[in-house]
Amino acid sequence: MCDSVWSAEYPHVSIGMTMFHELMHMTTGVIDYKPTPRSPPIYDTNKLFKLAIDKPDAARLSAKNYTLFAMESGMNKDDFMKYSEGRSIIDMTCKDLSSGCYKLASGCCKSSNIQFGNGNSLTEQCCASCTHFDSTKTCKKKATCSNKYSNCAREVQRNPRLCNFRVKKDCCKACSEYNSSAASLLL
């Protein structure tokens, strides 16, 4: 195993998944697919997905695909996204283009004003994760609520407990934004 596995962000998972990957090589004959003999192996989730479409027989022989399958089959969605590269794919037209999409989308995409350096909105950059989160009750509610008063955000920041009372209805958007930002601090 490479030295880098020991200093990974989540070594207990990285080491286990690396060992699984290597055991797949030793026991099944799967490989690390390379498009050409001199190119580096493909480990990127989006590239592996495209490989499965273009060359399914080659994708079937990829140790990384077996590792991702084992992770996704044995972990809940949050853990899988945390411990894998974090890029979901629904199809070639709706996929996450950044590794931080799952965490960013957890705050709901339709009400987000996040812009990426390439000009994409959060929904464009993180289509698969946004599709997942925007279908939740929390995000559906957040997308339909608004602030009745212009000072809602300031008042909620000053006294978040206001969201426990009637103000919650009048300042729905400010309370939702405060709650999602407070929840993200716990991650």
Image (cartoon, rainbow, N blue to C red):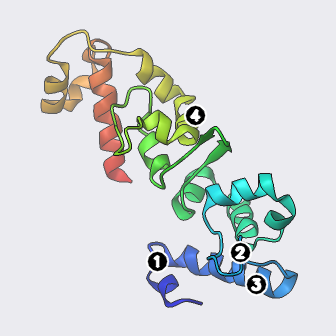
Q: Looking at the image, tell me whether mark 2 or mark 1 is earlier in sequence order.
A: 1
Q: Position of residue 39 (x, y in %)?
A: 63, 76
Asked if one can make out residue 75 in the rendered structure from this viewpoint, the answer is no
Q: Could you tell me which secondary element the residue under label 2 belongs to?
A: loop
Q: CA distance from mark 2 to mark 1?
A: 28 Å
* N-terminal-most mark, 1 or 4: 1
Q: Secondary structure at mark 3?
A: helix
Residue 58, placed above or below residue 128: below
Residues packed near mark 1 inside 10 Å, few (<14), some (14 to 19) or many (20 plus): few
Badge 4 vs badge 2, beta-carbon distance below 8 Å: no
Choose mark 4 or mark 2, whichever is in front: 2
| Chain-order first, disc 2 or disc 3 | 3
The residue that label 2 is drawn on is 36
The span from disc 4 to disc 2 (Cα, nearest Å) is 35 Å
Which sits earlier in the primary sequence, circle 3 or circle 1? Answer: 1
Depth check: give the residue in front, 173 or 55.
55
Q: Residue furthest top?
A: 148
Measure how far apart labels 3 and 1 are at the Cα level. Answer: 20 Å
The amino acid pointed to by label 2 is: Thr
**Which residue carries the number 4 mark?**
131
Name the residue that disc number 1 marks. 8
